[in-house]
Amino acid sequence: MFRKLIAATAASALALGLAACGGSAADSSSGGDSEGGTIAVITVDLANSYWQAEANTAKEAIKKAGYEATVNAHGADPDKQNQLIDAAISQQVKAIVLDPAGAKESVPAVQKATDADIPVFLVNAEIAEQGIAKSQIISNNAQGATIGAEQWVESMGGEGKYVELFGNPTDNNAQVRSDGYAAVISAYPDLEKVGQETANWDRVQGKEKMEGLIAAHPDITGVIAGNDEMALGAIEALTGAKMIDDVKVLGFDGNADAVEAVRSGTMVATVLQPIVQGTENAVTQAVEFLKSGKTGASSEKQIIDCFLITKDNADKYTGPFVLESS
């Protein structure tokens, strides 16, 4: 039985956000009661559908709670993240909802906000320390990688040569997913990993790195990718090389393009991350903390299970990162 996730709403019009951070993507939306103050949302990349859904969900939830929202993106750059945190502190925002730019790299930024009495609520990715942020809400990446790898191994028939596209090395999620894949695949000695490249969660890089892997290993029959964007880039490269019919590709995130690839048969499966649910939880806990001084959660670190999307249930995908109950 799949858990019903709440759909991310459409983005509101872009406007000026944190002025101190020139060149960053930003927008500001008024809530029902502007006297509630402002909650800053800092995500990774607003051009990526996954993080766009995260930002849209946070913004809508903040508005419904009676606060204003500013939305910015750090582009996985810790220095830019620091600038955005500094700007949020100078604006005296009430709280920060943050998708961090690196597990270790983000600790000082979160500490800085906390020292300024601004509570920080992390979503999607964790940091290397606990006790600084009020909440760290993440997908169960190990569980998601396991169910994805099991489906992929079945499609491969337990044998063949394959390559891996790895995410951003500063993001703990990249290694956790890679390790989860490996734990499953290691039980099949006839599956041989012949190459790995880092493509930083990006579709363009995924295509470029996949083209190089194809040139080096033209006899591969499988690709495992740390996220959908890299997997979709790989599919473009495989299609260009006229290999797509013979290579099994696994993705991770559950974005709309990946689900369409699953439907069409160019992707074996994608693992849907419950980013909408996780982001709504982060905003709910931020608002509760501002009202009562407590998040209402039983622990700082909270993990939400992922869902597997295959051809068998792709018709239940009804919106950005939303899978309806069966």
Image: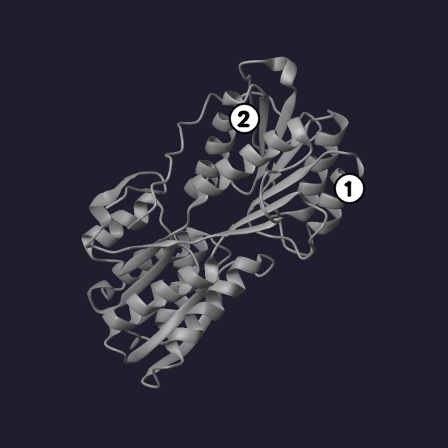
Instruction: Tell me the quarter of the picture where residue 41 sits.
Output: top right
Circle nearer the N terminus (1, 2): 2
The reply, left or right, for residue 177 in relation to residue 151 is right
**Foreground: 105 or 276?**
276
Amino acid under disc 1: Lys
Is 7 placed above or below 67 here? below
Can the viewer see residue 48? no
**Which mark is on residue 190?**
none
Question: Which numbered tag is attached to residue 112?
Answer: 1
**Residue at disc 1, secondary structure:** helix
Looking at the image, is 107 positioned above or below residue 63? Answer: below
Expressed as whole percent of the image width and height from the top left, the position of residue 325 reads: 27, 43
- Residue 294 visible in image: yes
Residue at 44%, 27% in the rendered image: 11
Of residues 112 and 217, which is closer to you in this image? 112
Q: Is mark 2 on a helix, strand or loop?
A: helix
Residue plotted at (62% across, 38% down):
295
Frontmost residue, 100 versus 207: 100
- Which residue occupies the foreground of this view, 193 or 68? 68
Task: Name the residue located 29 percent from the left edge and 79 percent from the top edge.
Answer: 160
Residue 267 at x, y = what percent?
Answer: 27, 58
Label 2 near label 1: C-beta < 8 Å? no
Amino acid at the residue labelled 2: Ile
Res. 62 mark: 2
Percent position of residue 102, x then y: 63, 53
Crowd band around label 1 with a 10 angstrom C-alpha radius: few (<14), some (14–19), many (20+): some
> How far across and down, in percent of the image, does residue 196 sit?
46, 71
Nearest to the eye among marks 1 and 2: give it: 2
Q: Distance between the residues labelled 1 and 2?
A: 23 Å
